[in-house]
Amino acid sequence: LAGEKVLHKPGKGAFYHTDLDEYLRAEGITHLVFTGVTTEVCVQTSMREANDRGYDCVLLEDCTSSYFPEFKQSAIEMIRAQGGIIGWTAMSRDLIAALP
């Protein structure tokens, strides 16, 4: 879309050597929803980077994927561990239902 932020990431995480953090802060964004592939690499890395920078994060379980289902499940369990140490997980229908 016209004016939409396009991010060219050189690494696994969306924050590594990009201006994503500066962009999000300038826009006043504090909460992030994560989707994509692969759950256990790029998605989880980006979510961890966001968490380290103070963002509240949720991963939509049915909007991520992996070549290995057991890797996806392990990543989801790590994200949820210790009361959401990295963030939270949900299904997309629950997020959609919660929107105004």
Image: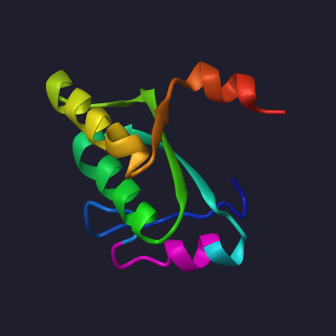
Q: Is residue 58 visible?
A: yes
Where's residue 77, x and y in %? 28, 33
Q: Residue 48: say if magenta.
A: no
Q: Considering the image in quadrants, where does the C terminus appear?
A: top right
Using the image, determine if residue 38 lies above or below residue 42.
Answer: above
Where's residue 76, x and y in %? 31, 34
Q: Residue at x 35, y 79 (%)?
A: 17
Q: Residue 17: say if magenta.
A: yes
Q: Residue at x 42, y 28 (%)?
A: 61
Specify start and end residues of the magenta stretch as a single range: 16-24
In the visual, does 5 lie left or right of 96? left
Using the image, determine if residue 71 lies above or below residue 91.
Answer: below
Q: Is residue 38 visible?
A: no
In the visual, does 90 lie left or right of 23? left
Q: Residue at x 26, y 60 (%)?
A: 12
The colour scheme used here is rainbow
Where's residue 97, x and y in %? 72, 22
Using the image, determine if residue 25 lies above or below residue 38.
Answer: below
In the visual, does 68 lie left or right of 15? left
Q: Quadrant of residue 93?
A: top right
Total marks shown come to 0
Q: Quadrant of residue 25?
A: bottom right
Which residue extends farthest right? Answer: 100
Q: Residue at x 73, y 28 (%)?
A: 98
